[in-house]
Image: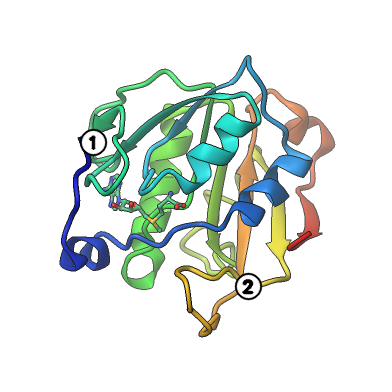
Amino acid sequence: MTVVTSKFARVDNELYETEEWATEALLRHFPVGPDDRIWEPAAGNHKIADVLRAHGAKVFTSDIAAYDRRHDRIHDFLGEKRIFPADSIITNPPYGKGNRQAAAFARRALERCDGLVALLLTAKFDFGNTRVDLFRDNPRFLAKIALIDRIQWFPGDKSGTEDHAWFVWGREDGFAALRGWPTLIYEGRP
Ligand SMILES: C[S@@+](CC[C@H](N)C(=O)[O-])C[C@H]1O[C@@H](n2cnc3c(N)ncnc32)[C@H](O)[C@@H]1O
């Protein structure tokens, strides 16, 4: 079944679709494969999920709304339930006013997954003293992948006013703790 939602629902839920190259940029540094059970919890039209699947990963999709693609579950990720035991969570979440929804997504993702968490966020998301629990004081914070090209969010979008980056966290007992410092990587379109 194809579910078509109104333009209002798309705008209201912040449906912006991630171009393939941006996910490929993440996977060049944090590859996925057939052993990975990944949860895409704000899957939209599966733009990220499709790239992960093309790399062989098993991807569980959920979203608060249905668009053109069928999700495994309709689910509010900011609610109480953890519906999938993921090894990794990878998504471009809604940002919300003052990035507050994005911060809530990041905290929920870290609660629900003790493996790799990768979120595509605005480039300065790690700035600000209200998020030190996610970055400065978080031993799981591994890497920031700064995208030096701008993402086109829809066909014909020439605005490109905002820079973005992937923020990546790993296991508590993993190499983040051993190495001590997060890595900064620059990436872009091929
Ligand atoms: C920026 S879009 C990204 C879509 C997809 N991840 C991609 O990168 O193409 C954000 C998505 O988050 C979904 N969303 C908004 N609030 C949500 C919530 N509380 N729980 C789960 N999904 C939510 C929207 O419906 C939308 O599909």
Name the spot of residue 187 as percent of width and height, x first: 77, 59
Tell me the residue that label 1 is attached to.
75
Write the residue at 30% across / 33% down.
71
Q: Is mark 1 on a helix, strand or loop?
A: loop
- Do residues under tags 2 and 1 come within 8 Å of each other at their CB atoms? no
- Within 10 Å of disc 2 (Cα), the crowding (few <14, some 14-19, many 20+) is some
- Kindly indicate the quadrant of the structure image that contains residue 13: bottom left
C-alpha distance separating marks 2 and 1 = 29 Å
Q: What residue type is labelled 1?
A: His
User: Disc 2 designates what residue?
Assistant: 150
Q: Is residue 27 above or below residue 134?
A: above
Q: Residue at x 68, y 23 (%)?
A: 173
Q: Where is residue 42 in the image (x, y as percent from the top left)?
A: 37, 45
Specify the label residue 163 is tagged with. Answer: none
Whole-percent x, y for residue 7 in the image: 20, 67
Q: Does the numbered disc 1 mark a residue whose Cβ is under 8 Å from ligand 1?
A: yes
